[in-house]
């Protein structure tokens, strides 16, 4: 990371290693091709498409007839979908609209149907070949039924199942859950497209064995629910996901229709501690510079506060809020809006090693949270800056 | 907050009460007019100007001659400067450039001189009537001297003093501190404009007495340093700041040249707990909606995760990550990227009170952190939406 191109960036700067992104994506893609399960990548971590949106264009080629041909060398959503622009998951309607506006289709808005956005969801359902929503409450089904789609179209609905994750979803074991699934399947103008379980409880795991225990449990509970549905005469898709479980699938996951991980495109320190990846797989970093010395506190000040890194992880790492690449003896002990305080894990700080202006590289605890703080991601490959990715924001 | 206009917003939504903003600003302005001290408001909390930047215009009046007159009803930086567009503090160079590009001047970039941005600072210094930088290390002075300004202009430099805050700044008691101040004052092409102390240690206070003890201590130490400078034949401005201390000034602050609070424009729950304001003064809220029920966990799910609120405060309030307006029995216990989990502080949840789609209002723990998560602030006055403010981001 001592490349001249990177050192030209204003800090703090979010930088993305394009080669690692491609490798992470390739590994995940091949894993599910082998397993025969459809990979439906989640866009929530990066929320980017390419660098065109705000006027950054990588290469413009002027053709013989004088027309312009615009080359986008680095398209994250394209990388994740292998260029098909089909079969993605999003967490906000802003993402759904952003991708729909850029030629993506077969989009699953995997979020408990928000009542303020039903009309917007209807518009996307009427416009795209396949826009899919999710719900986990009978009242949400009633809300959809109040807004029948035009031209005989159906609402494509996934039922969210809570298999022990403890966030959204109806509980797998609740008798009302099967009843809700059947109500969706039988409702006019509505189709039960699938059953969706997020196994975010893998985030409490350490190591492959624990991850796979959660993956197995979630798979079992989901497949058992699919059996119940089948017994009631209903068939539909099934999908489970989370980056840890999808990085280390169990064999039975081959019986699912789909998986939907997202964070794997970047990974992060948290994922490396869970056991999803190695620290070397992390594709996103934050560059920061030393801006001051505080010898009266044995500390360095750097130009990355929580606006550049986020507060996720709450400083629980031995090295504080991040891993400082190549400086295992340093700890990012605290941050305010635009300042970070670093100190040695032990002993006095050798200030001669860190003159003002020194660039340091932070490996983030949680890449989704860190990426959310940046309006521009600087993309590099083999030490050269090759483009900018500009995320969509909001809801 | 049950107004029809607000209920039309997609959630999560950051809403700003324009009347409270104006009242908070008026109180602070009058306080320092009475004390005879220049108020230099900090822009870091809101970072907005008006709604024009991205194409949102409040009112367009077509004049008789056919020309257009554009009305910006709600200009936060204009409110804070009383329309003068002079005498502000910023925390990033992006803010400095944003305000400079919109006709602001007398801008203090109160951040330890970042070596990557010296050329950009020089350009602003050569372009504006008064662009001021800050430093706290002899090497930063050397860096400035390497880039003399054109046309005989001087670098306007504030020395950052650490009077016990423990972030940036040279320690007030260090013999090297006076030496650095004199070196700035004596350097060719450089002027010692002032001495600047941020008393962020007021954030550890509870109540006016403790706040004023820190304000008194910071004032004393700053004024003592000014005396030392005077004894050495150097005079310059002095400034201290933080919203708690500036909300409850001590008499001796009248001897300072300036103060530089920022958060007071919005205030927040943290400030109300410190004693800077009452909860009723908080001018910024986040609207959220109930998206799901989780009776198996006695919880509600709302559509505000950390992308809508930030993780600041780490859930330390009795009500978790925020105060839920009008629902003192509810606690926002945890958040992930787009989901918030709420539960009663005690007892079983009465779900009939919170049907799906119910709007709830979160009063944020730290408004700077919450505002940083939003690309649009929805501004309302007396229950009507009156405009949008669009913040600048980045560095």
Image (tube, coloured by chain):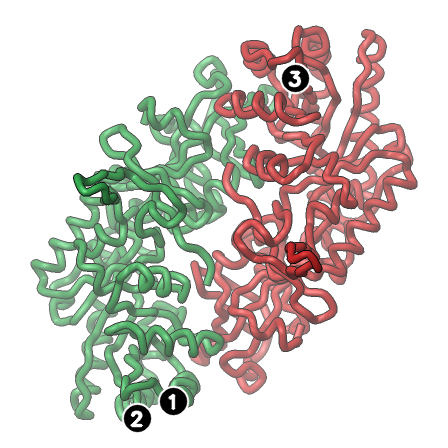
Chain colours: A green, B red
Q: Which mark is residue B361?
A: none
| Left or right side of A146 for A229 | left
Q: Which mark is residue A188?
A: 2
Q: Chain of mark 2?
A: A
Judging by the rendered image, the residue that carries numbered circle 3 is B155
Categorize mark 1 by other alpha carbons within 10 Å: few (<14), some (14-19), many (20+).
some
Q: Position of residue B310 (x, y in %)?
A: 53, 54
Pair 3/1: label in front: 3
**Which residue occupies 83% across, 40% down?**
B212
Circle 1 SS class: helix
Categorize mark 3 by other alpha carbons within 10 Å: few (<14), some (14-19), many (20+).
many
**Which residue occupies 20% across, 73% down?**
A220
Q: Nearer the viewer, residue B374 or A39?
A: B374
Q: Chain of mark 1?
A: A
**Residue A230 in view here:** yes
Categorize mark 2 by other alpha carbons within 10 Å: few (<14), some (14-19), many (20+).
few
Circle 3 SS class: strand
Q: Chain of mark 3?
A: B
From this view, report whether residue A343 is shown above or below residue B13: above
Q: CA distance from mark 3 to mark 1?
A: 67 Å
Q: CA distance from mark 2 to mark 1?
A: 8 Å
Judging by the rendered image, the residue that carries numbered circle 1 is A145
| Left or right side of B76 for A77 | left
Circle 2 SS class: loop
Q: CA distance from mark 3 to mark 2?
A: 72 Å
């Amino acid at each position: 990371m001592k490349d001249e191109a990177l050192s030209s960036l204003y800090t703090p700067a979010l930088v993305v290693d394009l080669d690692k992104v491609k490798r992470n994506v390739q590994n995940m893609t091949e894993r599910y091709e082998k397993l025969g399960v459809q990979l439906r990548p989640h866009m929530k971590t990066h929320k980017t498409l390419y660098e065109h949106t705000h006027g950054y264009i990588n290469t413009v080629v002027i053709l013989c007839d004088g027309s312009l041909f615009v080359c986008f060398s680095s398209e994250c959503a394209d990388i994740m979908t292998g260029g098909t622009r089909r079969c993605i998951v999003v967490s906000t309607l802003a993402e759904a609209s952003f991708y729909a506006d850029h030629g993506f289709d077969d989009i699953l808005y995997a979020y408990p149907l928000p009542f303020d956005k039903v009309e917007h969801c209807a518009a996307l359902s009427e416009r795209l070949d396949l826009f899919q929503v999710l719900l986990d409450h009978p009242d949400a089904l009633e809300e959809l039924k109040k807004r029948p789609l035009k031209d005989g179209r159906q609402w494509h609905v996934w039922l969210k199942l809570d298999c022990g994750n403890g966030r959204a979803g109806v509980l797998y074991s609740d008798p009302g859950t099967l009843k809700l699934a059947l109500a969706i399947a039988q409702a006019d103008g509505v189709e039960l497209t699938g059953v969706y379980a997020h196994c975010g409880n893998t985030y409490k795991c350490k190591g492959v064995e624990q991850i796979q225990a959660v993956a197995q449990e979630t798979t079992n509970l989901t497949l058992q629910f699919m059996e119940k549905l089948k017994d009631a005469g209903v068939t539909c898709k099934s999908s489970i996901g989370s980056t840890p479980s999808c990085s280390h699938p169990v064999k039975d996951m081959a019986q699912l229709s789909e998986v939907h991980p997202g964070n794997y495109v970047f990974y992060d320190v948290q994922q490396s501690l869970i056991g999803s990846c190695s620290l070397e797989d992390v594709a996103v970093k934050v560059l920061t510079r030393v801006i001051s010395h505080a010898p009266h506190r044995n500390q360095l000040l750097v130009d990355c506060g929580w606006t550049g890194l986020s507060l996720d992880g709450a400083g629980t790492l031995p090295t504080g809020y991040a891993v400082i690449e190549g400086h295992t003896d340093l700890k990012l002990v605290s941050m305010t809006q635009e300042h970070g305080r670093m100190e040695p894990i032990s002993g006095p700080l050798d200030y001669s090693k860190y003159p003002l202006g020194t660039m340091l590289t932070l490996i983030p605890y949680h890449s989704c949270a860190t990426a959310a703080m940046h309006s521009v991601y600087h993309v590099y490959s083999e030490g050269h800056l090759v483009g900018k990715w500009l995320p969509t924001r909001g809801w």
